[in-house]
Image (cartoon, rainbow, N blue to C red):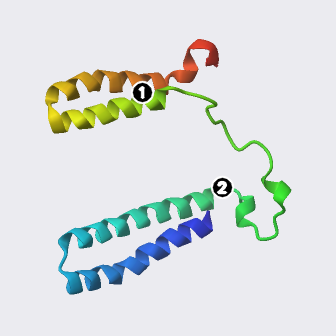
Amino acid sequence: MKVEGNLFAGIGIFLIPVTPIYWYYSEDWTGTTALTLTIGLCALIGFYLLFTAKRIDLRPEDDPTALIEDGAGELGFFSPHSWWPLILAGAGGVATLGIVFGMWLFALAVPIFAYAVWGMVFEYYRGEHAH
């Protein structure tokens, strides 16, 4: 994680002098704002990754002498199938269209969106996949 943290921190540090130079030559407030926010996001992610790298053991990806077999094994739990993300995305899209075209459509999509969030959060606490 140190490599990733240093990469994000380096990009953030690189953008600190680039942002005022960009503004000086272009006088574009939109791009300057985007670059400023990018500095903050790079700093946030870089800090998190470097902070987390100090708290966990060395990963095989961080060890230059690691073998391929060192990365073998269980990596975590990944959902094999779920329909909830599809329902959630559809309801979010309809809610966004509702803001554009009419609040009645937004009001129709909000309960579906809330139900989809509830279903996705509690998916593995009920039914055949409960544990």
Picture residue at 39% right of the left edge, 34% below the top: 89
Q: Where is residue 99 in the image (x, y as percent from the top left)?
A: 18, 36
- Residue type, numbered disc 1: Ile
* Residue identified by numbered label 1: 87
2, 84: nearer the viewer: 84
Residues packed near mark 1 inside 10 Å, few (<14), some (14 to 19) or many (20 plus): some
Q: Please tell me which residue is depicted at 17% across the width and 80% down the height of the picture.
A: 27
Give the mark, 2 or 1, whose residue is nearer the N terminus. 2
Question: Is residue 65 rendered to the left or right of residue 120?
Answer: right
Q: Quadrant of the N terminus?
A: bottom right
In the picture, the quarter occupied by the C terminus is top right
- Residue at image x 53%, y 22%? 123
Q: How crowded is mark 2: few (under 14 residues within 10 Å), some or many (20 or more)?
A: few
Is there a contact, CB below 8 Å, between mark 2 and mark 1? no
- What amino acid is found at the position of numbered circle 2 in the picture? Ile
Q: In this view, does 52 lie above or below 115?
A: below
Q: Mark 2 points at which residue?
A: 56
Name above or below for residue 21 compared with residue 61. below
SS for dot 1: helix
